[in-house]
Image (spheres, grey):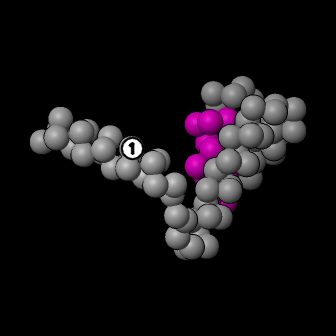
Amino acid sequence: MKCEEMLAVLNEYVDGTIDPAICGEFEKHMAGCNPCQVVVDNIRQTITLYKDGQPYDLPVRFRDHLHEALRKRWKETH
């Protein structure tokens, strides 16, 4: 399995709905591919943070910059 193929089935793997035949290939690829390991680990951490449901206070400067960028993007599309 190549990285592109792994990324194509990544959602199914993370959701636990991947075909067992493909799962073996996926895990074999993951065992030898550090960049893909990092991607999957980041996704797992993001899901864990989301499921915990705990709010996270953003630094004020970052929050203000994010809000400004979102407002700008919204004005461009509406």
Q: Is residue 17 visible?
A: no
Look at the image and tell me whether residue 34 can be seen: yes
Residue that appears at 46% across and 55% down: 60
List the residue tagged with mark 1: 65
Residue 32 is situated, as x and y percent measured from the top left of the image, at: 87, 32
Left of 29 or right of it: where is 15? left
Quadrant of residue 34 in the image?
top right
Q: Is residue 16 above or below residue 65?
A: below
Q: Nearer the viewer, residue 63 or 25?
A: 63
- Residue at 39% in and 44% down: 65
Give SS at disc 1.
helix
The residue nearer to you, when weighing 68 against 74, is 68
Q: Quadrant of the N terminus?
A: top right
Residue 10 located left or right of residue 41: left
Q: Identify the image quadrant of the C terminus.
A: top left
Question: Residue at point 33% right, 49% down?
Answer: 67
Q: Residue at x 69, y 28 (%)?
A: 3
- Using the image, determine if residue 59 lies above or below residue 10: below
Quadrant position of residue 74: top left
Residue furthest out toward the front = 61
Is 39 displayed left or right of 68 in the figure? Answer: right
Spot occupied by residue 73 in the image (x, y as percentages of width and height): 25, 39
Comparing 6 with 22, the one in front is 6
Where is residue 39? Give x, y as percent: 68, 40
Q: Between residue 28 and residue 62, name the one nearer to us.
A: 62
**What is the magenta range?**
6-16
Question: Residue 70 magenta-drawn?
Answer: no
Q: Quadrant of residue 35?
A: top right
**What amino acid is found at the position of numbered circle 1 in the picture?**
His
x, y percent for residue 63? 42, 52
**Magenta highlight on residue 12:** yes
